[in-house]
């Protein structure tokens, strides 16, 4: 059974999330992400980044993640990816406005974000190339296609279809996810409706299905390595106390004491 995900739903107001929870469960989603879009040119005040709070009610039957999308228009904005405050978000997406920023983000900050979310509603000022996509594949960074812009108006639909075709051709049908970008529950569609829709973009059924299921696992796993490891190599785990270790230790593995340490088994017997 496929576990479908929608990793880009605009964050609702407090108290309105139950509408999304009920609808997403009915449509067949098991993981969703509420997204905060931050324009870095306005969020940086005296070189300090102001971030929104994540105070949303949880859902027992649905995995709810918190996402932030940083819209960058200047190379200095990329330094915010090292801000420790971003660790409270499960997913970090980047929306660069130029090819230079796209190249710098991939080469200098590959482990600091998971998604590249370009504005497909407008004609891109550059063409996606293999030099962009290959480093992303090596660093588990995925591109994003939002389908809501394709059902709003004709001009956005035209640009979304054209940019999606370029991305699909450059990536050979791999390395991207498909999400909604919905600002209202009325724009949400079921997983197989989304698959049928993006096949009109020239994306094959198999690639479209992977883009809302298995490809999203890349985002989850990289999010765990970003928040719980050091550069994806070292992980810090809390050690259990001595008393917990003794209680959890199997009785059959406890050896008989030597003559030099007669008090060790007595202590174990009192604990067990």
Image (tube, rainbow, N blue to C red):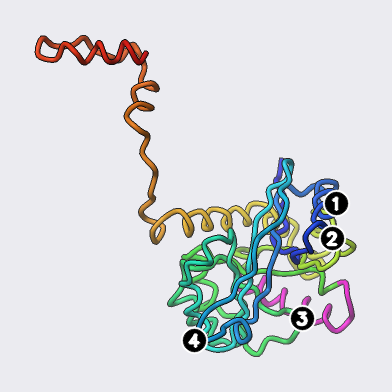
Residue at numbered disc 1: 23
* Residue 59 to residue 167: above or below: above
User: Element under label 4?
Assistant: helix
* 238 relative position to 220: left or right: left
Q: Is residue 59 magenta?
A: no
Would you identify the image quadrant in which residue 181 lies?
Answer: bottom right
Farthest residue, direction left:
260
* 212 relative position to 241: left or right: right
Q: Residue at x 69, y 66 (%)?
A: 35
2 or 3: mark nearer the eye = 2
Q: Residue at x 74, y 41 (%)?
A: 61
The disc label shown at residue 96, or none? none
Classify mark 4: residues with Cα within 10 Å, few (<14), some (14-19) or many (20+). few
* Residue 27 to residue 100: above or below: above
The disc label shown at residue 76, or none? 4
Give the CA separation, mark 2 to mark 4.
Answer: 35 Å
* 237 relative position to 4: left or right: left
User: Element under label 1?
Assistant: helix
Taking the image as drawn, is residue 132 in sight? Answer: yes
Residue at numbered disc 3: 121
Part of the protein shown in magenta: 151-171
């Amino acid at each position: 059974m496929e576990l479908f995900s929608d990793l880009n739903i605009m964050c609702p107001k407090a108290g309105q999330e139950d509408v999304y929870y009920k609808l997403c469960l009915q449509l067949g989603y098991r993981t969703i992400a509420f997204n905060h879009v931050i324009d870095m040119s306005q969020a940086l005040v005296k070189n300090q980044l102001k971030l929104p709070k994540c105070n949303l009610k949880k859902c027992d039957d649905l995995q709810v993640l918190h996402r932030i999308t940083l819209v960058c228009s200047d190379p200095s904005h990329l330094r915010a990816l090292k801000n420790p405050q971003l660790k409270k978000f499960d997913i970090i997406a980047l929306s660069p406005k130029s090819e230079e920023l796209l190249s710098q983000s991939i080469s200098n900050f590959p482990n600091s974000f998971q998604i590249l979310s370009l504005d497909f509603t407008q004609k891109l000022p550059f063409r996606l190339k293999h030099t962009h996509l290959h480093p992303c594949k090596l660093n588990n960074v995925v591109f994003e296609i939002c389908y809501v812009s394709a059902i709003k108006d004709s001009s956005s639909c035209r640009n979304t279809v054209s940019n999606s075709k370029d991305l699909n051709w450059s990536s050979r049908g791999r390395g991207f996810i498909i999400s909604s970008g919905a600002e209202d529950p009325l724009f949400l569609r079921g997983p197989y409706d989304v698959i049928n829709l993006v096949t009109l973009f020239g994306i094959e059924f198999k690639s479209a299905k992977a883009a809302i299921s298995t490809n999203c696992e890349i985002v989850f796993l990289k999010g765990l390595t970003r928040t719980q490891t050091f550069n994806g190599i070292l992980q810090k785990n809390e050690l259990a106390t001595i008393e917990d270790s003794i209680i959890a230790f199997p009785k059959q593995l406890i050896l008989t004491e030597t003559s030099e340490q007669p008090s060790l088994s007595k202590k174990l017997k009192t604990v067990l």
